[in-house]
Image (cartoon, grey):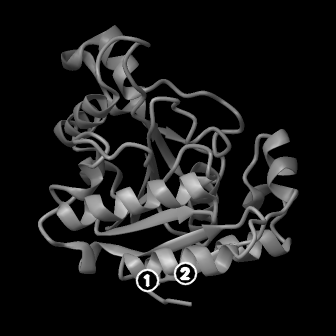
């Protein structure tokens, strides 16, 4: 089982990227599980045809731990990806990071990975704040590899730098965990150069550059991933190549 965490600033396109990677891998016959680690709980929406699935935390509040079943919190998408959303606390109450910890512990207690036996697990993680909860995939063996989605925009670079520092703090495992940066281009001046400098600072590399493409918006308007909506498009080909790099360890 390959476990990959994909971090990035909110709004940078990490959920779009992660969902298309999941869909691409599923189309190649891999059994994929995607876990959204963001209080917005929208990581898997395009995989689920626009449907908002019940979150782990909300289901836990409603049913209680003793009555929870995997069928309550894991859902199979049209493309065959097993989807889950950690969710978050009610607005103004509790800690979203703690909610991720609770969700991971619950998935473990229900033997989710042993029962569903995925080939690949993708964690889609909000990277604006890398507190104890949001750094959960970095710890305790939850993720083998980490990738950061970033553009050349200032706040995206800032968030990516913080994520890189958090990885370094995790028992000095940065060389084995941080595998690269996914450049989600926004058309910023000197964008590739800026992100390359960040990669150099973090001791890693750009593993893929996803060019800005209106097909993303077209697909999302249809509540689909690009892989499902336009499988023959150049953008779909970019996501497919990225997906194979992530599971094969091939760099650009």
Element carrying mark 1:
helix
Residue 48, image x and y in percent? 64, 39
Which quadrant: the C terminus? Answer: bottom right
Q: Name above or below for residue 92 compared with residue 217.
A: above
Q: Is residue 29 visible?
A: yes
Residue position marked by numbered label 2 in the rendering: 196
Say which residue appears at 34% left-offset and 28% top-offset. Answer: 96
Question: Which residue occupies the foreground of this view, 199 or 78?
Answer: 199
Name the image quarter holding residue 19: bottom right
- Are circles 2 and 1 on residues that touch, CB within 8 Å? yes
Q: Is residue 241 visible?
A: no
Residue 198 in the figure: left or right of residue 98: right
Residue 185 in the figure: left or right of residue 182: right
Residue position marked by numbered label 1 in the rendering: 200
Name the image quarter holding residue 186: bottom right
Element carrying mark 2:
helix
Number of other residues with Cα within 10 Å of mark 2, as a class: few under 14, some 14 to 19, many 20 or more: some
Residue 133's disc number:
none
Residue 210 in the figure: left or right of residue 135: right
């Amino acid at each position: 089982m390959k476990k990959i965490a994909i971090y990035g600033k909110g709004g940078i396109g990490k959920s779009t990227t992660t969902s298309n990677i999941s869909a691409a891998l599923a189309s190649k016959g891999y059994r994929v599980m995607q876990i959204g680690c963001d209080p917005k709980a929208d990581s898997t929406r395009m995989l689920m045809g626009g449907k908002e699935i019940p979150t782990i935390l909300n289901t836990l509040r409603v049913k209680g731990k003793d009555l929870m079943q995997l069928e309550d919190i894991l859902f199979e998408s049209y493309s065959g990806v097993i989807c889950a959303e950690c969710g978050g606390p009610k607005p103004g109450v509790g800690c979203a990071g703690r909610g991720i910890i609770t969700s991971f512990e619950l998935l473990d207690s229900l033997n989710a990975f042993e029962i569903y036996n995925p080939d690949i697990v993708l964690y889609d993680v909000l990277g604006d704040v890398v507190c104890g909860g949001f750094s959960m995939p970095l710890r305790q063996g939850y993720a083998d590899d980490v990738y950061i989605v970033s553009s050349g925009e200032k706040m995206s670079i800032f968030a990516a730098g913080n994520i890189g520092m958090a990885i370094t703090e995790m028992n000095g495992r940065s060389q084995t965990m941080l595998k690269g940066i996914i450049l989600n281009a926004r058309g910023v001046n000197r964008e590739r150069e800026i992100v390359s400098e960040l990669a150099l600072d973090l001791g890693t590399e750009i593993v893929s550059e996803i060019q800005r493409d209106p097909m993303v918006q077209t697909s999302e308007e249809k509540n689909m991933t690009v892989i499902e909506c336009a499988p023959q498009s150049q953008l779909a080909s970019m996501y497919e190549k990225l997906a194979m790099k992530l599971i094969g360890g091939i760099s650009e």
